[in-house]
Amino acid sequence: MDLNVLWFILLCVLLGGYAVLDGFDWGVGILHPLASTDTEKRIFINAIGPLWDGNEVWLVTFGGAMFAVFPEVYTSVFEGFYTAFMLLLFALIFRAVSIEFRSKMASPRWRRAWDTGFFVSSLLAAVLFGVAIGNAVTGIPLTPRGQYYGGLLGLVNFYSVLVGLLTVALFVMHGAIYLYLKTEPPLQDKVHHWIWHGYGTFVVLYILTTIVTLTQYPSAAENFKHKPWMWSFVGLALAAIGNVPRAVYLKKPGQAFVSSSLVILSLVGLFAVAIFPRLLISNPDPQNSLTIYSGASSPMTLKIAAIFAAVGMPFVLGYTAVIYWSFRGKVRITEHSY
Protein backbone atom coordinates (compact mmCIF):
# COMPACT_ATOMS: atom_id res chain seq x y z
CA MET A 1 0.00 0.00 0.00
CA ASP A 2 1.03 3.60 -0.59
CA LEU A 3 2.60 4.59 2.76
CA ASN A 4 1.25 8.14 2.46
CA VAL A 5 -2.28 6.79 2.18
CA LEU A 6 -1.63 4.31 4.98
CA TRP A 7 -0.54 7.08 7.33
CA PHE A 8 -3.55 9.18 6.37
CA ILE A 9 -5.77 6.25 7.39
CA LEU A 10 -3.85 5.67 10.62
CA LEU A 11 -4.18 9.33 11.61
CA CYS A 12 -7.92 9.15 10.97
CA VAL A 13 -8.11 6.03 13.16
CA LEU A 14 -6.27 7.81 15.97
CA LEU A 15 -8.48 10.89 15.61
CA GLY A 16 -11.61 8.74 15.60
CA GLY A 17 -10.45 6.76 18.63
CA TYR A 18 -9.75 9.95 20.54
CA ALA A 19 -13.11 11.47 19.59
CA VAL A 20 -14.98 8.36 20.77
CA LEU A 21 -13.09 8.01 24.06
CA ASP A 22 -12.57 11.60 25.15
CA GLY A 23 -15.85 12.62 23.54
CA PHE A 24 -17.95 11.05 26.28
CA ASP A 25 -15.63 12.67 28.86
CA TRP A 26 -16.46 16.07 27.42
CA GLY A 27 -20.14 15.16 27.25
CA VAL A 28 -20.19 14.18 30.93
CA GLY A 29 -18.48 17.46 31.80
CA ILE A 30 -21.06 19.48 29.85
CA LEU A 31 -23.92 17.59 31.53
CA HIS A 32 -22.35 17.89 35.00
CA PRO A 33 -24.30 21.05 36.04
CA LEU A 34 -27.56 19.12 35.56
CA ALA A 35 -26.71 16.84 38.50
CA SER A 36 -28.86 18.05 41.39
CA THR A 37 -26.94 16.74 44.42
CA ASP A 38 -23.31 16.46 45.43
CA THR A 39 -23.57 12.66 45.29
CA GLU A 40 -24.81 12.79 41.71
CA LYS A 41 -22.00 15.16 40.76
CA ARG A 42 -19.47 12.76 42.31
CA ILE A 43 -20.99 9.86 40.36
CA PHE A 44 -20.53 11.83 37.14
CA ILE A 45 -16.88 12.51 37.90
CA ASN A 46 -16.17 8.96 39.04
CA ALA A 47 -17.71 7.61 35.85
CA ILE A 48 -14.80 9.10 33.89
CA GLY A 49 -12.24 9.54 36.70
CA PRO A 50 -10.23 6.34 36.05
CA LEU A 51 -10.39 6.76 32.25
CA TRP A 52 -9.89 10.34 31.08
CA ASP A 53 -6.09 10.35 31.25
CA GLY A 54 -5.83 7.08 29.32
CA ASN A 55 -8.19 8.46 26.69
CA GLU A 56 -5.81 11.34 26.03
CA VAL A 57 -3.09 8.88 25.06
CA TRP A 58 -4.83 8.74 21.68
CA LEU A 59 -4.44 12.50 21.24
CA VAL A 60 -0.76 12.39 22.19
CA THR A 61 -0.20 9.52 19.74
CA PHE A 62 -2.03 11.45 17.01
CA GLY A 63 0.16 14.52 17.54
CA GLY A 64 3.35 12.48 17.65
CA ALA A 65 2.46 10.59 14.50
CA MET A 66 1.67 13.77 12.59
CA PHE A 67 4.97 15.31 13.70
CA ALA A 68 6.86 12.27 12.42
CA VAL A 69 5.14 11.60 9.11
CA PHE A 70 3.62 14.94 8.05
CA PRO A 71 5.99 17.55 9.54
CA GLU A 72 5.02 20.32 7.09
CA VAL A 73 1.37 19.97 8.08
CA TYR A 74 2.29 19.75 11.77
CA THR A 75 4.31 22.97 11.52
CA SER A 76 1.59 24.87 9.66
CA VAL A 77 -1.17 23.73 11.99
CA PHE A 78 0.63 24.41 15.25
CA GLU A 79 2.12 27.69 14.05
CA GLY A 80 -1.08 29.07 12.58
CA PHE A 81 -3.44 27.76 15.26
CA TYR A 82 -1.11 28.48 18.18
CA THR A 83 -3.60 30.52 20.22
CA ALA A 84 -6.43 28.08 19.53
CA PHE A 85 -4.24 25.15 20.57
CA MET A 86 -3.20 26.94 23.75
CA LEU A 87 -6.88 27.39 24.58
CA LEU A 88 -7.49 23.69 23.95
CA LEU A 89 -4.48 22.76 26.07
CA PHE A 90 -5.73 25.04 28.83
CA ALA A 91 -9.16 23.38 28.67
CA LEU A 92 -7.70 19.87 28.88
CA ILE A 93 -5.40 20.79 31.78
CA PHE A 94 -8.09 22.68 33.68
CA ARG A 95 -10.53 19.81 33.25
CA ALA A 96 -8.02 17.43 34.82
CA VAL A 97 -7.28 19.85 37.66
CA SER A 98 -11.00 20.31 38.32
CA ILE A 99 -11.52 16.56 38.57
CA GLU A 100 -8.58 16.06 40.92
CA PHE A 101 -9.11 19.10 43.16
CA ARG A 102 -12.90 19.09 43.58
CA SER A 103 -13.00 16.63 46.47
CA LYS A 104 -9.94 17.97 48.30
CA MET A 105 -12.21 20.09 50.50
CA ALA A 106 -15.82 19.64 51.61
CA SER A 107 -16.62 23.35 51.28
CA PRO A 108 -19.65 23.90 49.00
CA ARG A 109 -18.08 27.07 47.59
CA TRP A 110 -14.85 25.22 46.80
CA ARG A 111 -16.72 22.44 45.01
CA ARG A 112 -18.93 24.85 43.07
CA ALA A 113 -15.84 26.64 41.77
CA TRP A 114 -14.28 23.42 40.48
CA ASP A 115 -17.63 22.24 39.13
CA THR A 116 -17.78 25.42 37.06
CA GLY A 117 -14.23 24.81 35.85
CA PHE A 118 -15.11 21.24 34.89
CA PHE A 119 -18.11 22.38 32.86
CA VAL A 120 -16.44 25.34 31.13
CA SER A 121 -13.28 23.42 30.21
CA SER A 122 -15.29 20.48 28.81
CA LEU A 123 -17.53 22.79 26.77
CA LEU A 124 -14.57 24.84 25.50
CA ALA A 125 -12.66 21.72 24.42
CA ALA A 126 -15.66 20.33 22.52
CA VAL A 127 -16.32 23.65 20.76
CA LEU A 128 -12.67 24.09 19.76
CA PHE A 129 -12.53 20.52 18.45
CA GLY A 130 -15.57 21.14 16.27
CA VAL A 131 -14.36 24.54 15.05
CA ALA A 132 -11.06 22.95 14.02
CA ILE A 133 -12.90 20.27 12.02
CA GLY A 134 -15.06 22.93 10.38
CA ASN A 135 -12.03 24.96 9.28
CA ALA A 136 -10.31 21.83 7.98
CA VAL A 137 -13.28 21.25 5.65
CA THR A 138 -13.70 24.84 4.43
CA GLY A 139 -10.01 25.60 4.19
CA ILE A 140 -7.90 28.40 5.62
CA PRO A 141 -5.72 31.07 3.98
CA LEU A 142 -2.19 29.73 3.46
CA THR A 143 0.88 31.24 1.86
CA PRO A 144 2.82 29.27 -0.77
CA ARG A 145 5.03 28.07 2.12
CA GLY A 146 2.00 26.70 3.95
CA GLN A 147 1.85 29.42 6.60
CA TYR A 148 -1.52 30.53 7.97
CA TYR A 149 -2.08 34.29 7.88
CA GLY A 150 -5.69 34.73 8.97
CA GLY A 151 -5.41 35.29 12.75
CA LEU A 152 -7.52 33.73 15.52
CA LEU A 153 -10.76 35.47 14.53
CA GLY A 154 -10.28 34.22 10.98
CA LEU A 155 -11.09 30.74 12.27
CA VAL A 156 -14.52 31.86 13.47
CA ASN A 157 -17.15 31.74 10.75
CA PHE A 158 -20.70 30.48 10.34
CA TYR A 159 -19.70 27.01 9.19
CA SER A 160 -17.01 26.40 11.82
CA VAL A 161 -19.36 27.57 14.58
CA LEU A 162 -22.10 25.32 13.20
CA VAL A 163 -19.76 22.31 13.26
CA GLY A 164 -18.70 23.35 16.78
CA LEU A 165 -22.32 23.25 17.93
CA LEU A 166 -22.85 19.92 16.15
CA THR A 167 -19.82 18.52 17.99
CA VAL A 168 -21.14 19.69 21.35
CA ALA A 169 -24.55 18.10 20.70
CA LEU A 170 -22.89 14.86 19.53
CA PHE A 171 -20.69 14.61 22.61
CA VAL A 172 -23.59 15.49 24.93
CA MET A 173 -25.56 12.61 23.44
CA HIS A 174 -22.52 10.33 23.65
CA GLY A 175 -21.79 11.37 27.24
CA ALA A 176 -25.41 10.93 28.32
CA ILE A 177 -25.47 7.42 26.85
CA TYR A 178 -22.24 6.61 28.68
CA LEU A 179 -23.77 7.84 31.96
CA TYR A 180 -26.87 5.76 31.24
CA LEU A 181 -24.57 2.77 30.93
CA LYS A 182 -22.70 3.52 34.17
CA THR A 183 -25.45 4.69 36.56
CA GLU A 184 -28.39 3.15 38.40
CA PRO A 185 -31.91 4.43 39.15
CA PRO A 186 -33.06 7.04 40.02
CA LEU A 187 -30.15 8.95 38.44
CA GLN A 188 -30.30 6.66 35.42
CA ASP A 189 -33.90 7.73 34.84
CA LYS A 190 -32.82 11.39 34.68
CA VAL A 191 -30.04 10.57 32.26
CA HIS A 192 -32.52 8.70 30.09
CA HIS A 193 -34.40 11.97 29.43
CA TRP A 194 -31.18 13.86 28.70
CA ILE A 195 -30.29 11.37 25.98
CA TRP A 196 -33.43 12.23 24.02
CA HIS A 197 -32.76 15.98 24.24
CA GLY A 198 -29.15 15.50 23.13
CA TYR A 199 -30.17 13.16 20.32
CA GLY A 200 -32.86 15.49 18.99
CA THR A 201 -30.51 18.49 18.99
CA PHE A 202 -27.81 16.46 17.28
CA VAL A 203 -30.11 15.22 14.50
CA VAL A 204 -31.33 18.75 13.73
CA LEU A 205 -27.78 20.13 13.62
CA TYR A 206 -26.58 17.12 11.59
CA ILE A 207 -29.20 17.72 8.91
CA LEU A 208 -28.46 21.46 8.84
CA THR A 209 -24.68 20.88 8.66
CA THR A 210 -25.12 18.37 5.83
CA ILE A 211 -27.24 20.80 3.82
CA VAL A 212 -24.77 23.66 4.32
CA THR A 213 -21.80 21.44 3.44
CA LEU A 214 -23.32 20.15 0.20
CA THR A 215 -24.59 23.56 -0.93
CA GLN A 216 -21.72 25.81 0.14
CA TYR A 217 -18.76 23.41 -0.09
CA PRO A 218 -19.56 20.92 -2.89
CA SER A 219 -15.89 19.93 -3.17
CA ALA A 220 -16.36 18.01 0.09
CA ALA A 221 -18.42 15.45 -1.86
CA GLU A 222 -16.06 15.23 -4.85
CA ASN A 223 -14.47 11.93 -3.79
CA PHE A 224 -17.85 10.18 -3.76
CA LYS A 225 -17.99 10.51 -7.56
CA HIS A 226 -14.77 8.58 -8.07
CA LYS A 227 -14.82 6.10 -5.18
CA PRO A 228 -18.36 4.73 -4.67
CA TRP A 229 -17.25 2.57 -1.73
CA MET A 230 -16.95 5.77 0.31
CA TRP A 231 -20.75 5.87 0.47
CA SER A 232 -20.38 3.17 3.11
CA PHE A 233 -19.55 5.92 5.61
CA VAL A 234 -22.90 7.57 4.83
CA GLY A 235 -24.70 4.25 5.27
CA LEU A 236 -22.90 3.56 8.55
CA ALA A 237 -23.73 7.03 9.87
CA LEU A 238 -27.43 6.72 9.02
CA ALA A 239 -27.68 3.20 10.43
CA ALA A 240 -25.93 4.16 13.67
CA ILE A 241 -27.97 7.35 14.09
CA GLY A 242 -31.15 5.34 13.53
CA ASN A 243 -30.19 2.65 16.03
CA VAL A 244 -29.47 5.04 18.92
CA PRO A 245 -33.16 5.81 19.72
CA ARG A 246 -34.08 2.16 19.17
CA ALA A 247 -31.49 0.95 21.69
CA VAL A 248 -32.39 3.70 24.18
CA TYR A 249 -36.10 2.93 23.89
CA LEU A 250 -35.42 -0.78 24.48
CA LYS A 251 -33.17 0.19 27.42
CA LYS A 252 -30.08 -1.44 25.95
CA PRO A 253 -27.37 1.04 26.97
CA GLY A 254 -24.55 -1.13 25.63
CA GLN A 255 -26.03 -1.12 22.13
CA ALA A 256 -26.75 2.60 22.39
CA PHE A 257 -23.14 3.35 23.34
CA VAL A 258 -21.76 1.25 20.50
CA SER A 259 -24.13 3.03 18.12
CA SER A 260 -23.12 6.51 19.30
CA SER A 261 -19.47 5.47 18.98
CA LEU A 262 -20.13 4.34 15.39
CA VAL A 263 -21.81 7.69 14.70
CA ILE A 264 -18.60 9.46 15.73
CA LEU A 265 -16.38 7.10 13.74
CA SER A 266 -18.55 7.43 10.64
CA LEU A 267 -18.45 11.23 10.87
CA VAL A 268 -14.66 11.11 11.15
CA GLY A 269 -14.73 8.89 8.07
CA LEU A 270 -16.87 11.44 6.20
CA PHE A 271 -14.45 14.17 7.27
CA ALA A 272 -11.57 12.12 5.87
CA VAL A 273 -13.43 11.63 2.58
CA ALA A 274 -14.10 15.39 2.37
CA ILE A 275 -10.45 16.41 2.59
CA PHE A 276 -8.55 13.47 1.00
CA PRO A 277 -5.86 13.60 -0.34
CA ARG A 278 -5.37 17.00 1.26
CA LEU A 279 -4.47 17.39 4.91
CA LEU A 280 -4.67 21.16 5.12
CA ILE A 281 -6.85 22.91 2.54
CA SER A 282 -5.87 26.38 1.39
CA ASN A 283 -8.72 28.80 0.76
CA PRO A 284 -8.84 30.96 -1.36
CA ASP A 285 -5.63 29.63 -2.96
CA PRO A 286 -6.12 25.86 -3.46
CA GLN A 287 -2.65 25.48 -4.98
CA ASN A 288 -1.15 26.21 -1.55
CA SER A 289 -2.88 23.22 0.07
CA LEU A 290 -0.77 20.62 1.84
CA THR A 291 -1.49 17.06 0.74
CA ILE A 292 -0.45 13.65 2.00
CA TYR A 293 2.41 13.89 -0.49
CA SER A 294 3.54 17.53 -0.40
CA GLY A 295 3.49 17.65 3.41
CA ALA A 296 5.00 14.22 4.07
CA SER A 297 8.38 13.05 5.34
CA SER A 298 10.75 10.99 3.21
CA PRO A 299 9.67 7.49 2.12
CA MET A 300 12.23 5.94 4.48
CA THR A 301 10.82 7.93 7.42
CA LEU A 302 7.31 6.78 6.56
CA LYS A 303 8.50 3.18 6.40
CA ILE A 304 10.32 3.32 9.74
CA ALA A 305 7.35 5.08 11.36
CA ALA A 306 5.05 2.35 10.02
CA ILE A 307 7.22 -0.29 11.70
CA PHE A 308 7.05 1.59 15.00
CA ALA A 309 3.28 1.91 14.59
CA ALA A 310 2.93 -1.82 13.98
CA VAL A 311 4.79 -2.45 17.23
CA GLY A 312 3.29 0.36 19.31
CA MET A 313 -0.40 0.40 18.33
CA PRO A 314 -1.14 -3.01 19.93
CA PHE A 315 0.15 -1.60 23.21
CA VAL A 316 -2.17 1.41 22.94
CA LEU A 317 -5.12 -0.84 22.12
CA GLY A 318 -4.17 -3.30 24.85
CA TYR A 319 -3.77 -0.57 27.45
CA THR A 320 -7.16 0.88 26.56
CA ALA A 321 -8.84 -2.54 26.72
CA VAL A 322 -7.31 -3.38 30.12
CA ILE A 323 -8.33 -0.05 31.65
CA TYR A 324 -11.91 -0.29 30.46
CA TRP A 325 -12.19 -3.91 31.55
CA SER A 326 -10.79 -3.09 35.00
CA PHE A 327 -13.33 -0.32 35.57
CA ARG A 328 -16.35 -1.97 33.98
CA GLY A 329 -19.71 -1.97 35.70
CA LYS A 330 -21.80 0.61 37.51
CA VAL A 331 -20.29 3.54 39.38
CA ARG A 332 -20.53 3.36 43.17
CA ILE A 333 -19.21 5.96 45.58
CA THR A 334 -16.68 4.70 48.15
CA GLU A 335 -14.26 6.35 50.56
CA HIS A 336 -11.61 6.31 47.82
CA SER A 337 -13.84 7.94 45.19
CA TYR A 338 -13.40 11.49 43.89
Image: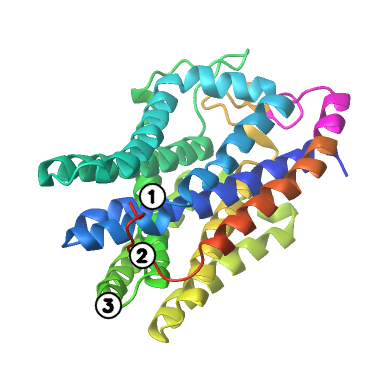
Which residue is at a point 41% across and 24% down the rendered structure image? 86
For marks 2 and 3 on the same chain, the one whose residue lies earlier in the sequence: 2
Query: Which span of residues is magenta-colored?
Result: 291-305
Q: Is any part of residue 293 visible from this angle?
A: yes
Q: CA distance from mark 2 to mark 3?
A: 11 Å
- Mark pair 3, 1: CA separation: 21 Å
Name the residue tied to disc 3. 189
Residue 273 spot, x, y in % from top left? 64, 49
Q: Position of residue 304 (x, y in %)?
A: 85, 30
Q: Secondary structure at mark 2?
A: helix
Dot 2 crowding, Cα within 10 Å, few <14, some 14–19, many 20+: many
In the image, residue 2 sits, relative to residue 187, either above or below, namely above
Q: Label 1 amino acid?
A: Trp
73 on left or right of 68: left
Residue 288 image offset from top left, x and y in percent: 62, 21
Q: Is residue 85 magenta?
A: no
User: Do the CB atoms of the residues marked 1 and 2 lie less than 8 Å apart?
Assistant: no
Could you say whether the residue bearing mark 1 is in a helix, strand or loop? helix
Residue on which the image places disc 2: 176
* Residue at (42% x, 87% y) in the render: 250
**How many residues crowd mark 1 within 10 Å: few (<14), some (14–19), many (20+)?**
many
Identity of the residue furthest to the bottom in this view: 250
Residue under label 1 = 26
Q: Nearer the viewer, residue 153 or 334?
A: 334
| Residue depicted at x 42% and y 19% | 150
Q: For residue 193, which numbered disc appears in the image?
A: none
Amino acid of disc 2: Ala
Nearest to N terminus: mark 1 or mark 2: 1
- Asked if residue 74 is positioned above or below residue 3 in the image, the reply reads above
Residue 144: x, y in percent? 62, 14
| In the image, residue 299 lies in the stretch drawn in magenta | yes
